[in-house]
Structure formats: structure tokens, C-alpha cells
Image: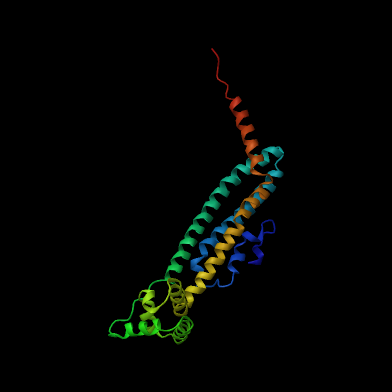
Amino acid sequence: MFDDIDTRVSPALDPETYRAVEGYNDTTRMFVDDVVNAFNDIYVTVGKVHDARQLAEKNPAWTPENRILIVGQEANKQKDRAVRRLALAERDLRARIAHTECELTSPLTERAGLGSLNGEVRSFVRGLDRSKREAFMREALERDDGPTLEAILGAQPFLSGLTPLDHEHFLRLHHVKRNPHLVVRLDLMKRFLDMIERNGSIVHVQFDKAIGAKPSVVGALQVANDQALAALKIEPTG
């Protein structure tokens, strides 16, 4: 919702940016919503870090260094949690992409009960020159001629005079024609993966901006603080 826009946080992390991707709808959202939810978590968390920093700056009991250290320590815990969630969403998204790719290249089985027809079809196709063979395959795909395509694509490529690459190409076209919903799903998931790869680094930049300091500064303050606290642990002498 536009009312929920936080202008302090990059639009690259806004979940609405992902819901607006072409192909995202009630039918396809189940395949990418874990990514949307992960970015929503990051978007809201970065906004809360900004809120915490603003409150810290109003606390007269804290020096500027105290504010960076205290806000930075908690923000880094939240960043680690949110980044892990995004990493798990990316892992699962990659797995779904691989599964869908397999569905679009799964082997066919020639139709049973056709006697010698399957072999005759393959023999005919093998006897054509390459250009006519490709034209024959395109026409069979256009007609959605199941028995013919299964006879050719459901057997070893060489039986029909096809190369393995030709066979893979026509097999994928056949699955694409039969399963357009898989193509839409795969395209959406790949779009989301591209966005994760492009925007993932922005997450760290946005947390640093919300904290008001880079991790090296927070780390240096942490070391100094730990050393000072350690020095206060004074053991009694005999």
C-alpha cells in the first residue's frame, strides 16, 4: 500500500516492488511469496532501526558513540536474522526453478498400441533432409500432433535423424506448448531471482545507513567498549 511507504528505505527492498513484477498474481504468488515476505521483513526492520536511531539521538544520557554502538549491536542482530531468511528464500526459489526446468524437459514415452506406426514415423523423418525435418517438426508442434511427436521425441534422437540438441529443443517446445502455465511460472521465478541477485547487496547498505555508521566503526567501538569493561573487572588483592 502507498500509505506504508517508508521514504527512508530504498524502494529496492519494498515488497510492493516485487508484487508489481509482471506475472505476479493469485495463481503464481505461491511460488515467490517467500521472497516477498523476506523483503517485507527487511523493509520493516530497516525502518525500525531508523526509528531506534532517532530515539537514541534524543537520549541525553548517551554520547554519539554510545548511540552508534547500542543501535548498531541490536541492528546487526536483526540484519543477520533477516539476511538468513532471504538466503533461505533464495535457496528454495532456485530449487523451484530447477524443478520447473526439469518439467519442461521431461522425457516423453511413445504411445503404445500403434503397432509399427511409431517406427514408420521415425523412419520417415530420418529420411528427410535437415531443413525438411525441421519444417516437419514445426508443423507437428503447431498441430499439437501428440502421436507423431511422442513417436519421435519419445525415442532415441538418432532413430529420427535428430541430434541430441535438436531433440532437446523440440522436446522443450512441445512441453512449452502443452504447459504454458509452467512457462509463466518459470519466467516469474527467474525475474525474482534476478532481483535478489541485484538487490541483495543493497540490504547491507540500507542497514548501515539506518545505523548511521559502517560495520567497521561499530566494530571498533565494540572493541573499545569490551576493553574498557574488562578493565573494570578488578580482582581483590591479598
Give percent across and percent down for residue 74: 59, 44
Q: Picture coordinates of residue 159 (x, y %)?
A: 36, 77
User: Residue 22 versus residue 25: which sits nearer the camera?
Assistant: 22
Horizontal and vertical percent position of residue 124: 38, 85
> Residue 113, located in which quarter of the rendered image?
bottom left
- Say whether residue 191 is left or right of residue 210: left
Quarter of the image that includes the C terminus: top right
Q: Nearer the viewer, residue 94 or 224?
A: 94
Q: How many marks overall?
A: 0
* Image position of 8 with respect to 119: above or below: above
Judged from this view, the residue extending furthest toward the top is 238
Q: Quadrant of residue 219?
A: top right
* Residue ID at (69%, 38%): 65
**Looking at the image, residue 92 lies above or below residue 72:** below
- Residue at the spot x=36%, y=83% of the render? 123
Q: Is residue 167 left or right of residue 234?
A: left
In front here: 87 or 105? 105
Is 27 drawn above or below residue 96 in the view shown?
A: below
Quarter of the rendering containing residue 232:
top right
Q: How is the image coloured?
A: rainbow
At x 66%, y 65%, the residue is 3
Residue 78 place in picture, x, y as percent: 57, 48
Question: Of residues 177 and 107, which is closer to you in this image?
Answer: 107
Q: Quadrant for the N terminus, please.
A: bottom right
Residue at horizontal 38 percent and vertical 75 percent from the top: 158
